[in-house]
Amino acid sequence: MGIDSMRVGGGRCPPLLVAGLLAACLMLICNWWTLSTENFELLRQFDELNEQLKISAEERDQCVTLRGTLQQRYKHAEDEVNSLHVRLEQQAELKKKNDELEDSINVCKSELESLNKLDATKTATLETLRLEKNTINTQLDVKRDENKRLQEEIEQLKDKIKLTCNLNPQKKAISLLQPQTSPKNQKNNDSNGELEDNPELAGNTETTDGNIVESGRDQHTNGGTIGD
């Protein structure tokens, strides 16, 4: 019955239906345009997000690389710090050894100065002893010369005593040959006669004279020894 009522009017579409269809088409077109625009915007945003994701990935890789580099630098810095600590400890030990060496050098300098002073003292002592030695040698030479002179005098005295001893028997012989002029000469002659009669007595007399000469020699010798 509705269809029949719609067909009333010669079989044409009613204007309301056409208007409704047109409105629906416009709405569909508007929706399609809106959806297309939104879809395009979403695609653009998706592409931007992909680009940003790529950039983020690259930045992440760069950050990872930079982190590795920084870790290597940090490790290298730690190694340098450790080496610096070792160097500082070595420098401290070297400074300590240097101070000890300086103390040893100062002690050696003090000992060297003491040795130099001792050497100077020894040199002065040796020079003094050398001078004393020269003086003693000079005195010894003088004493030797004096001793030699005394020995020569002793030899001369010995020769004189020998000459005196040799002259005494000659004088006795001469006195025996002379005539008796006085009691004293007579007494001497008597004594000489006794000596001639008793050769042993004459030997004793000569021995006595020899002892007197020897005692004189001993006195001269002792006098020379005392002078030395």
Image: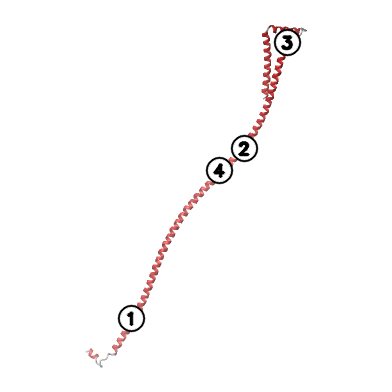
Task: Find residue 212 and report its image quarter.
Answer: top right
Q: Earlier in the sequence, mark 3 or mark 1?
A: 1
**Pointers 3 and 2 in contact (C-beta within 8 Å):** no
The residue tagged 1 is 32
**Nearer to us in this view, 119 or 170:** 170
Q: CA distance from mark 3 to mark 1?
A: 201 Å
Mark 3 residue element? helix
Quadrant holding the C terminus: top right
Q: CA distance from mark 1 to mark 4?
A: 108 Å
The amino acid sitting under disc 3 is Ala
When the figure is inspected, residue 217 is found, relative to residue 185, above or below; the finding is: below
The residue tagged 2 is 123
User: Which is closer to the viewer, label 2 or label 1?
Assistant: 2
x, y (%) of residue 95? Answer: 51, 49
Which residue is located at x 29 percent, y 88 percent? 18
Q: Earlier in the sequence, mark 4 or mark 3?
A: 4
The amino acid sitting under disc 1 is Trp
Left or right of 17 in this view: 215: right
Q: CA distance from mark 4 to mark 3?
A: 94 Å
The amino acid sitting under disc 4 is Cys
Which numbered dot is residue 152? none
